[in-house]
Image (cartoon, rainbow, N blue to C red):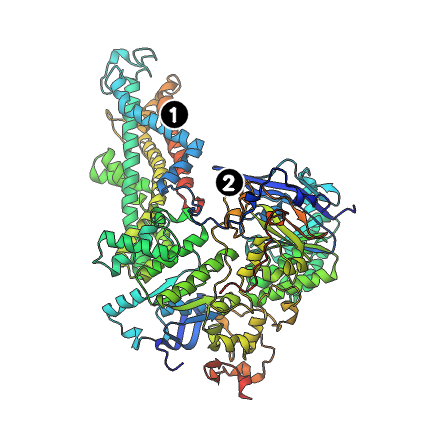
Amino acid sequence: MSQVKTDWINDTEGLSPEMFQIVGVDTTKDRVLRPHISYWQDAWRRFKKNKLAVFGLILLVILIFMVIFGPIMAKHSFEETNIAESYHPIDGEYWFGADKLGRDYFARVWQGGRVSIIIGVTGAFICAFVGCIYGGIASYFGGKIDSFMMRIVEILSSIPYLLVVILLSLWLDAKGIKTLLIAMCLTGWTGIARLVRSQMITLRQSDYVLAAKLLGVRPLKIVTSHLIPNTIGLIIVNITFRVPSLIFSEAFLSFLGLGIQSPDTSWGALCSAAQTVFTFKPHLMFFPALCIALTMLAFTLMGDGLRDALDPRQRK
Amino acid sequence: MEDKKVLFEVKDLKMYFPARGGKTVKAVDGVSFNIYEGETFGVVGESGCGKTTVGRTLLGVYQATAGDIIYKGKNVRDFNGDDKMSFSKNCQMIFQDPAACLDPRMSIGTIVSEGLNVHYKSMTREQKEERVNQVLSYVGLTSDYASRFAHELSGGQRQRIGIARALAIEPSFIVCDEPIAALDVSIQAQVVNLLTRLQKELGLTYMFISHDLSMVRHISDRIAVMYLGSLVELGDNKSIYGHPVHPYTQALFSAIPEPDPYHSWLKNRVHLQGEIPSPINAPAGCKFCTRCPKATDRCKVEAPALREVEPGHYAACHMLDI
Amino acid sequence: MSEHLLEVKDLAVSFSSYAGKIRAVRGVSFHLDAGETLAIVGESGCGKTVTVKALMKLYGNSAAFIEEGSSILFKGQEVVTMNNKELSKLRGEGIGMIFQDPMTSLNPTLTVGYQIAEGIRFHDKSVTKAEAEKRAAELLALVGIPSPEERIKQYPHQLSGGMRQRVMIAIAIACNADIIICDEPTTALDVTIQAQVLELLNELKEKTNKAFILVTHDLGIVFDFADRIQVMYAGVILERGTKYELFDDPHHPYTWALLNSVPSKQSQRKGSLYSIQGTPPDLMMDIKGCPFADRCDYCMPICKERMPQEIAITESHGVSCWLEHSMAPKVKAPAAGGEE
C-alpha cells in the first residue's frame, strides 16, 4: 500500500465546502433505464450488425429486382423463338446470348428465376403453415394424440420425396409448378412441425406460462398470447433456411426432367438444357447455375443473421 | 393461536412423480400443516426437499397424488368452475427467476394487466390502465414502465413486475417461491422490504419458500422445515430458531453463515455426514437416518410421526419419546 | 519492499460488444502472499470474476482484453505479456481455479479419475498413466471422497453436487499450484453441503501453505475463511482490509450497506432491512466520480465529480471515499440490524 497518499485528505485545492454537503440519493431522478427498444427494433439492430447477413439481404433484393424486371428489360420475350439467332453470342442485343432456338437467354434466366423463387418461397410458407398448425395441435393436446401425430410425422419424413414426385406426376399426369409444389410440401412440413412442437412444449413449461395459468387465463388464450408470439422468430428463421433447400430441390428435379417443362422454364430446367452443349457453350450453364448459387447463398446468410438476431437468449 | 382463521388446511399431502425405469419420485410424502390468515408461513429446506412442489400443489399446478387441501373450509377436489375462478383470483404466486417469469414479447403493462382481463372483465380500458399504474406504484415503479419490455429492466425491477402482476387482481394469499434467490444482496433487501410493507398495507398471507434461512427467519411468523419430502419440524419463528428439537433442524440452522469474524459458525456447527439422498430411493424409516448423528436402529425401520413438543411446536423424531 | 507472491497493479479489463466497450474492471491493484487468503466481495457484475480470470488470462472466446498499463506479477514474472506456452504452465502449476458450477466445468464424457490425471500428466510428462491415476485417487481421498479407487472410474453425472465440487478442488490442487482461486465455490450448493466444502477448503488452507483467493457475494462465508477482504463495486475496489478491520470499523457506505442488508440473529424480525436504492451503474458508460454515488445515502456533490483516491487508515486498511476527506462532515456507520 505504499503508493497510497494519505495527505490527500488535507488537500483542499480547488474544493469548496458546498461540495461536501450530504445530499444522499437523488430519488427525484428516474431510475436508470436501458434505452427503450421493442423486440423487432432490437432484432433489426442486431441484424444490421451482422455484415454478412446484410450482404445476403442486399443480394436478395437485387436478385428479386432482376427477377421481376429482368424479363421486361430484355429486348426479346423469353418465349420468342428465332432459329436464325440460334446460339447467338453475348452482345448488346442478346446480353446473355441466345439458346438453341434463338430465345433471349437474359429474359429466360430471369423468367426462370421467377419460377424458382416462387416455388421456393410459397413452398416454404405452405410447409411452415401446415407444420405450425400440426406441431401446435400435437403439443397442445399432448399425451397419446401427440405421440400418434408424431409417429405420422416420422413415417412421412422417411419417404424419399423423389419417389413422391415421380408417383405424383404419373398420377396427376402433369408436370409443372403445381405438381412440384404439392410433391415437395407433402413431406416438407414435417421438420417444422417437429420444431414448433418442441418449442411449444418448452414454452409451456416456462414460468410465465405457469403464471398465466395461475391467473386463470384460458388455455387457448395462452396459446395465442404467449406460445405463438414466442415461436414466430423461430418459424421465420426456419422459413429462410427452407427456401434455398426448396429452390435446390426444384432445380434438381427440373434437371432430371421431372420439373418445369418448356417453354416455361426455371433455373434447373435451363441448366438441364445447357448440359448437352456445355462443352462449347459454357455460359448457358454458367448464368442459371450462378443464379441458383447466389440465391441460396443470400437466403442462407440472411437466415444465419436472422437466427442470431431473433434468438431471445442472445438478447442483452 | 385460537382466534386466527385457518386459510389452508393441508392433510397428509402426497405428490409423486413418475421417474424413469418405473420408479417414483416421492417429492412430497405425507405433509400436514395449516396456514392462518395474515401470517407468513415460511418453508425451508435444501434442494430436493419438496418445498417448491408443496407450494405448487397448494395452488393446483399439480394434482395431488393423495391427501387433502382444504381452502376456506372447502376441499379443492370439490371445486366447481366458480370456485376455481375465485381461487385463482385469491391465490397467486411469485417466481424465483425474474427473467423467466415475464414473457419477453409482452410489454410490462400487458403482463400486469393479464389477470385483469380474466377476473375484471367489466373494467374499461382506462380503469385497467389506472389499476396497472396503481400496482406499479405499490411496488415502487412509475407508470412509465408500463410501455417497457422485460429485457429493458434489471433483475430487481423484473421481480417487482412479477409481484405487481400477482397483486393486480387483489389476491389474499401469495406463494413466494424463492423470490430472492436470483437477486443480488442489496436487491434482496429491497424485495424483502417490499414484501413486508405490502403485507402490512394489504393484509396479505404469504407462503415464503426459501433456502435462505436468515431471510426466512427475518420474514416468517411460523416455519416448516422439510427434508426429503417430509415435514421434520413445524412451529413459530421463536421456537424453531430459538430451540429447534429435530437433529436436522439443529444442523441446518447451525450451518447458516454468520458474518462475524470473532465467532466461527463453521467450527461450531452441528456436523452432518454425507449428502442428501435422492428422493427416488429415499431411505426407509426416518428419512434423515442416513445422516443423523443420533440415529438408532429404530430410526432405520420406523418413520417417526409429527408430535407436539410444546404448544404450536411440532417435530418428527423418535428421540422425543424418551 | 519484499516481493509478493502475486502483485496486481492498475488492472483494467474490457469487453468489446456490439454496443460499445464494456469496462468491467477499471484499475484494480492488490497483492497476495503465500499462505494467506484474500476475499473479493461484490455483487454480480462488479468485476470480481473478470479480475481473477485475468490473473490467468482466461477468457475463452469472449472478446475480453486487458487494457494497456495493467501489470500482473506472479513470482516476479509478468503475466500480461506471457505467451500461450507460459500461460498453460501458469494455469495449473502456478494458479488453480475452482468454479461456481462444477457440472459445467467438468467434462461429462470422461471419468473424474481421467480428468484429474490429465492435468497431472500435462504438467509433468514423466508421470506414467498408472502413477497419475494413483495420485488422482490420493487426491480424492484428500478432499474427503470415500472409496476413492472406485470413484475415479465414475463419470461426473454419477456424483452429487457436493462431490463434484470436491473433484473440482482435487483438480485445482493436483499440480501443486501456489494460488487457488475459488470463484463462488459454494453458491450452487445447499447450506449443509456448503459448510462441508468450506470446511474442506479451510483444512487445505491449514495443511498447505497455499494462497487462496475467494470470490463471493456472500458475506457470511467470507469472515470464516478469508484473512483479508476487498470490496469491489463497478470494477473498482472501494474498501480493503483485514476481516477484523472491515467488521469492526468499516468506512465505506457500501460496506455498511452490505453488512447491514443481510438479516442477522440480532436484527428485528419483519423490520425494514437496510437496503440500497437503485441498481448498479451501466458499465458501458463512462463513470465520472465515485461509481456508488448514485445509490449512496451519503452522496455529496463532489462524489459525482471526482473519483476519490484511496486513503490508508492502517497499513492494511484502505478506503476510497470522499467522506474521509478533511472537509467532509463526520458521519457514523449505521448500527447493524436495520432501522425501525
Residue drawn where x is 26% and y is 59% of the image: B118
Residue type of the residue flagged with mark 2 = Met
Q: Residues within 10 Å of mark 1 (few under 14, many from 20)?
A: few
Whether B175 is drawn above or below C110: the answer is below
Res. B183 visible in picture: no
Q: Which residue lies furthest to the bottom in this view?
A: B322
Q: Is mark 1 on a helix, strand or loop?
A: helix
Q: Mark 1 lies on which chain?
A: A
Estimate the x, y position of residue C48 in percent, counting from the top left: 59, 49
Residue C150, numbered circle = none
Name the chain under label 2: C
Instruction: Give how far across and how far down residue C244 sits, in percent.
Output: 67, 60
The residues tagged by marks 1 and 2 sit, at their Cα atoms, a distance apart of 45 Å
Q: Mark 2 points at which residue?
A: C284
Counting from the top left corner in percent of width and height, residue C116 is at 66, 55
| Image quarter (top left, top right, bottom left or bottom right) of the N terminus of chain B | bottom left
- Left or right, B282 with reference to A291: right
Dot 2: what SS? loop
Q: Which of C93 and B7 is in front in this view?
A: B7
What's the residue at 25%, 19% (across, down)?
A72
Image quadrant assignment for residue B13: bottom left
Mark 2: give few (<14), some (14-19) or many (20+) Cα within 10 Å: some
For the C terminus of chain B, which image quadrant? Answer: bottom right
Q: Which amino acid does label 1 sit on?
A: Leu
Whether residue C107 sits left or right of residue A145 in the image: it is right
Relative height, residue C141 to residue B320 (above, below): above
Q: In the drawing, what numbered circle is on residue A290?
A: 1
User: Which of B146/C129 is in front?
Assistant: B146
* Figure quadrant of residue A145: bottom left
